[in-house]
């Protein structure tokens, strides 16, 4: 009986990482899996849109500068999804774009937070933990 309650309360939060740079994807995945998160990485906005419903993430980490579909475009699409759970997932933009206008645009489109590359592992963990504790997004 005790094991069942530990199992049900110990469901890891799921994080979907979208970045076209394999090194960044691998680094983020390594940092977050050591924190006991379940992490899926994809290399494009279209891959995110294919996987989001199946993976059912609690948080998205989204790059802005990607070929074919920018993070801003992906953000708009996610925020307009008909599924209320998916459209309200906390989204942290993680990008080299550090101008105030970029941050403002991301937040105006529905991003919940913003991290500038290069980032420190501790800063990423802190931001992710804060978003997941605030967002109370549950499966």
Image (spheres, rainbow, N blue to C red):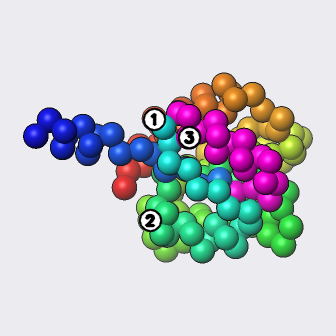
How far apart are the alpha carbons under marks 3 and 1?
Answer: 17 Å
Q: Nearer the viewer, mark 1 or mark 2?
A: 1
Mark 2 nearby-residue class (10 Å; few <14, some 14–19, many ≥20): few
Q: Estimate the x, y position of residue 9 in percent, counting from the top left.
A: 28, 40
Of 99 and 30, which appears nearest the observer?
30
Look at mark 1 in the image and give the residue it sits on.
133
Question: Magenta residues?
Answer: 18-35
First in sequence: mark 3 or mark 2? 3
First in sequence: mark 1 or mark 2? 2
Task: Say which quadrant the C terminus sits in.
Answer: bottom left
Per the rendering, the mark at residue 84 is: 2
Q: Estimate the x, y position of residue 88 in percent, counting from the top left.
A: 50, 57
Look at mark 3 in the image and give the residue it sits on.
33
Q: Estimate the x, y position of residue 42 in percent, counting from the top left.
A: 68, 62
Of 58 and 87, which appears nearest the observer?
58
Mark 1 nearby-residue class (10 Å; few <14, some 14–19, many ≥20): few
How far apart are the alpha carbons under marks 3 and 2?
Answer: 27 Å
């Amino acid at each position: 009986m005790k094991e069942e309650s530990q199992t049900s309360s110990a469901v890891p939060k799921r994080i979907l990482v979208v970045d076209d740079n394999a090194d960044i994807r691998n680094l983020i995945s390594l940092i977050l899996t050591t924190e006991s998160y379940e992490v899926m990485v994809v290399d494009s906005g279209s891959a995110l849109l294919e996987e989001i419903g199946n993976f059912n993430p609690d948080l998205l980490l989204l790059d802005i500068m990607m070929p074919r579909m920018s993070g801003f475009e992906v953000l708009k699409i996610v925020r307009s999804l008909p599924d209320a759970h998916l459209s309200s997932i906390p989204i942290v933009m993680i990008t080299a774009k550090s101008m105030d206008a970029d941050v403002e645009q991301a937040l105006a489109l529905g991003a919940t937070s913003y991290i500038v590359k290069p980032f420190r592992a501790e800063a990423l963990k802190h931001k992710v933990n804060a978003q997941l504790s605030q967002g109370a997004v549950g499966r």
